[in-house]
Amino acid sequence: MPFVKTSEPHILDIASKWLADEKGALIGVLATLNLTNHPTTRAVAIREITHFEPLLFTQKGSEKVKQIELNNKVSLTVLLDNSNKQITFEGRAYPITSNENQSYWDSYPQQSKIRFCVYGPKSGKYIENPAVLNHELFAFEKECQNKTLRMPEAYVGYRIRTKILKLYELLDHEISKSWVAKKTGSNWEVKRVVP
Ligand SMILES: Cc1cc2nc3c(=O)[nH]c(=O)nc-3n(C[C@H](O)[C@H](O)[C@H](O)COP(=O)(O)O)c2cc1C
């Protein structure tokens, strides 16, 4: 069945309101495909969402980056409103420009920069004694508290260019609501679906 426009509030207005109502940090579960096309997932913090395009930051050496470099089709699901609602963003992930990376790095709190400098470049590597990393953190904290920290090579942001947006609202006293929106060019075609 083709996607049709509906007369309900537009899915984008609904999604915007859900996101705006969220008070705490937005955490999503990002799905990527590994080298054998096996799906893998992990939690990521969502830095911001502009025009339904989520931005997240990670380490260049991480598994997810290796996977995205080979296949940038991703899906990201965010649970909202105490898990009564969910939004899924499906599309392709693209690294942001180095200028953008730099300006997000500059806006980071110093403590987050310090932590990233310590673990970011080594992300995913085997560690025999985790205490070593904590010692490194304490030493680096002392050394760098008031210093300007250069952006490490390992710091990278990805923006998801969303093509399909899915919304679900879990309801107790009526049938739950579910929508799917598909982006073609700059237009969104929306349909309400049976949950
Ligand atoms: C609440 C929460 C938020 C997280 N946020 C991020 C994040 O923003 N970026 C990131 O790379 N990893 C984040 N992680 C860690 C990832 O879930 C994951 O363990 C790590 O990135 C390695 O994933 P990968 O080996 O699949 O690349 C977060 C974990 C939790 C529990």
Image: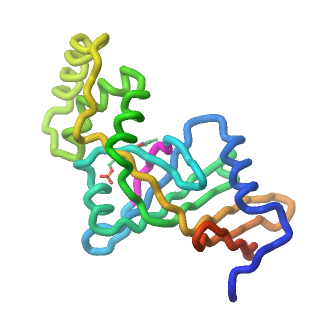
Compared to 33, does 156 lie above or below? above
Q: Main secondary structure of the magenta part?
A: strand
- In the rendered image, residue 94, in percent from the top left (x then y), is placed at 39, 58
- In the rendered image, residue 52, in percent from the top left (x then y), is placed at 59, 55
Q: Give ligand 1's quarter of the image.
A: top left
Is 92 magenta? The answer is no
Q: Which residues are magenta?
A: 41-46
Q: Is the C terminus in the top left, top right, bottom left or bottom right quadrant?
A: bottom right
Q: In the image, what residue occupies the spot 70% across and 50% down?
A: 16
Would residue 30 appear left or right of 125 to someone viewing this image?
Answer: right
- In the rendered image, residue 72, in percent from the top left (x then y), is placed at 37, 65
Q: In the image, what residue occupies the spot 26% across and 50% down?
A: 62
Compared to 93, does 180 lie above or below? below
**Colouring style:** rainbow
Q: In the image, what residue occupies the spot 85% across and 70% down?
A: 7
Compared to 185, does 46 lie above or below? above
Query: To which quarter of the image does residue 180 belong?
Result: bottom right
